[in-house]
Amino acid sequence: MIAPDKIIPYFNIDEPFEITPIGSGHIHHTFKVSGQKNFVLQRVNKNVFTQPEIIAHNNRIAFEFLKKNHPGFLFPKTIPDKNGNDLFYDHQGFPWRIYEMIENSFTLDGVLHEEDAYQAAKGFASLTKNLHGLDVLLLKPTIDRFHDLTWRYEQFEEALRKAKPEIITSADTVIQQAQSFQFLVSEYTQLIKNGSLITRITHNDTKVNNILFNSISRKALCAIDLDTLMPGYFIYDLGDMVRTFVSPVSEDEKDLDKIQFRKNIYDALLKGYLSEMNELLTEAEKKSIPFAGKMMTYIIALRFLADYLRGNTYYHITYTEQNLVRAKNQLRLLELIQPSVG
Ligand code: GN1
Ligand code: MG
């Protein structure tokens, strides 16, 4: 990889600066650029985002809409390079981008208190709410069929067909467990077919660490990681919050006994989400609230498992079994969510 300090001269950033790696994402390489002003520098993963220009396009359209219609709403500002482009391509063909750092803020890797769940959910909900009125067709999918459960199940089946026998053996019980939840795919298909969900502009990666909290008030300040800001259904956002908020441990936890469904956190996140979105959601959409967490937990379990079966080509890992551990973890969480949400 090209050293990040070699990229800075292509942007209007004053020297001296210091660069340090930050973030816990699975996809990009992220750095903090500290100087007279602070910035976030990212090298975009072009294998995952094969058309990074679409991300830049969607972000720009959303930014312009918000500036005009909700000028007080905080949205990460992209700093164009010296040629005025939102993405700078290095000589290896990797796109880089820079954002202004939002100061006096912090992120959480897990939800500790009800109030954090309430605030984070309110933060993500306010993004969709404030983008309401923007023609959803102006934004394009940055990853096709990203949260399409039917397609993700097919991908899992394909990975299973192509996997080496010894890999299948090592994941045998997890595969069976994943297959036992296949009924959720039919529920998803039915929900889409009956047209009860409205296409909205959603964030699509609503992990709690994608919310910036105000350092003093601990209120949600701003949603970050807008790579998948694109048309979607509200259950994608709500569901990924359930997946990442309700358990006291992360998707990387190996000890399944530590995974829990915290009802108080679930209630708080729902309250936070509805504090912004209650009026926009239709009665038909509200009926699908209990499905959201199950669907998103299942989809990520399938994606982790498929990646393990394929030989770990997608998510960053630090040890070979990590995607299998993550899949097991998410299936355990799904077992706990299933009876708890009605
Ligand atoms: C990836 O790396 P991060 O945190 O932005 C993934 C999400 C998954 C998540 C699981 C583009 O997100 O869909 O929920 O890992 N993003 C992409 O931790 O695939
Ligand atoms: Mg992301």
Image (cartoon, helix red, strand yellow):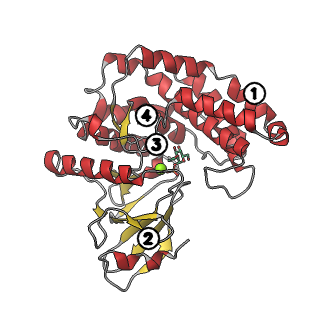
Q: Determine whether, in the image, residue 40 is placed left or right of residue 64.
A: right
- Tell me the residue that label 4 is attached to: 238
Mark 4 neighbour class, 10 Å CA radius: few under 14, some 14 to 19, many 20 or more = many
Return the x and y of residue 147 as percentages of the image width and height. 49, 34
Q: Determine whether, in the image, residue 161 is placed left or right of residue 31.
A: right
- Tell me the residue that label 2 is attached to: 32
Q: What's the residue type where badge 2 is placed?
A: Lys
Sequence-earlier tag: 4 or 3: 3
Q: What element carries label 2?
A: strand
Which quadrant is the N terminus positioned in?
A: bottom right
Q: Do the residues labelled 1 and 3 touch (CB within 8 Å)?
A: no
Residue 265 makes an appearance in the image: no
Which of the two residues, 157 or 190, is positioned nearer the viewer here?
A: 157
Q: Is mark 1 on a helix, strand or loop?
A: helix
Disc 1 and disc 3: Cα gap in Å? 28 Å
Return the x and y of residue 10 as percentages of the image width and height. 35, 76
Residue 82 makes an appearance in the image: yes
- Tell me the residue that label 3 is attached to: 143
Q: Do the residues labelled 2 and 1 touch (CB within 8 Å)?
A: no
Q: Is mark 3 on a helix, strand or loop?
A: loop
